[in-house]
Amino acid sequence: MRVSQACERNKEPIRAVLEAWLPPSARVLEIGSGTGQHAVHFCRTIAGLQWQPSERGEALVDLQEFLDCEGRQGLAPGSGLSKAMTLDLLEGHWPAGPYEAVFTANTAHIVPEAAVEALVAGAAGCLGPGGLLLLYGPFRWTDRPFEPSNAAFDAHLRALDPAMGLRARDWIAALAAAQGLAPLADVAMPAHNHTLVFGRGTS
């Protein structure tokens, strides 16, 4: 089974943000669950959490194998880890929800801009009143230079594929605003990452 060292390093800082923002017994849709490490860790450490992992079709088998091996024991009281579902951002087949939150980690910079637009729109469509969109990863700012490590990472991504690259926080905020999601927080995380939190009103 694949294991991501980045997930091992960031799972606890992200857990702290989720616990601070999620309502009790939150139903959360994760976009791009990858190895499944986040899904398992959060369900083991946050009581009552109801987590729906998702991935593109070609990655679903490996993800479900990890969930079956690691995610069927040791869960926190009342938490539940659902079977992974297929979700490709550009195909537009989103679950109906409603979810209290949609979460994604390290996704926006490795998919094309059209997929980021689809992610924000799709998330907004399946959030209930008061629902949250949380995006973790490295971002860039229009009013200040890159941190050297993020500048190097951005250049590396664009050399691999010009469609990849760190996204501007203000651009993502504009996408969210167009879908009725207001900016609620920008949480600084280790290694020059951030968690951006957007929310839908309750009325």
Image (cartoon, rainbow, N blue to C red):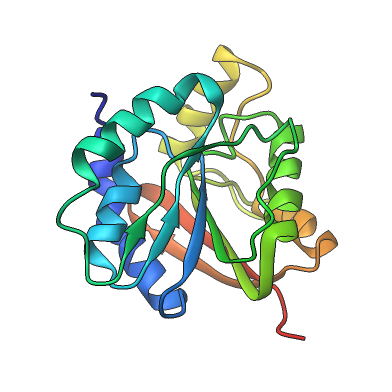
156 vs 98, left or right, is left
Q: Using the rendered view, name the quadrant where residue 51 is placed.
A: bottom left
Q: In this view, does 93 lie above or below 76?
A: above
Q: Using the rendered view, name the quadrant where residue 15 is placed.
A: bottom left
17 vs 78, left or right, is right
Residue furthest out toward the bottom:
203
Q: Is residue 152 above or below residue 73?
A: above
Residue furthest out toward the right:
178
Q: Is residue 142 above or below residue 90?
A: below
Closer-to-camera residue (150/30): 30
Asked whether the viewer can see residue 135, the reply is: no
Residue at x 79% of width, y 58% of height: 174
Closer-to-camera residue (98/41): 98
Asked whether the viewer can see residue 161, the reply is: yes
Q: Using the rendered view, name the quadrant where residue 127 is placed.
A: bottom right
115 vs 39, left or right, is right
**Rendering coords of residue 47 (x, y %):** 28, 72
Q: In this view, does 114 lie above or below 194?
A: above
Residue at x 46% of width, y 71% of height: 26
Closer-to-camera residue (7/87): 87
**Rendering coords of residue 161 (x, y %):** 61, 15
- Which quadrant, please, contains the N terminus? top left
- Which quadrant, please, contains the C terminus? bottom right
**Rendering coords of residue 162 (x, y %):** 67, 18
**Rendering coords of residue 56 (x, y %):** 55, 28
Residue at x 20% of width, y 41% of height: 70
Residue furthest out toward the left:
74
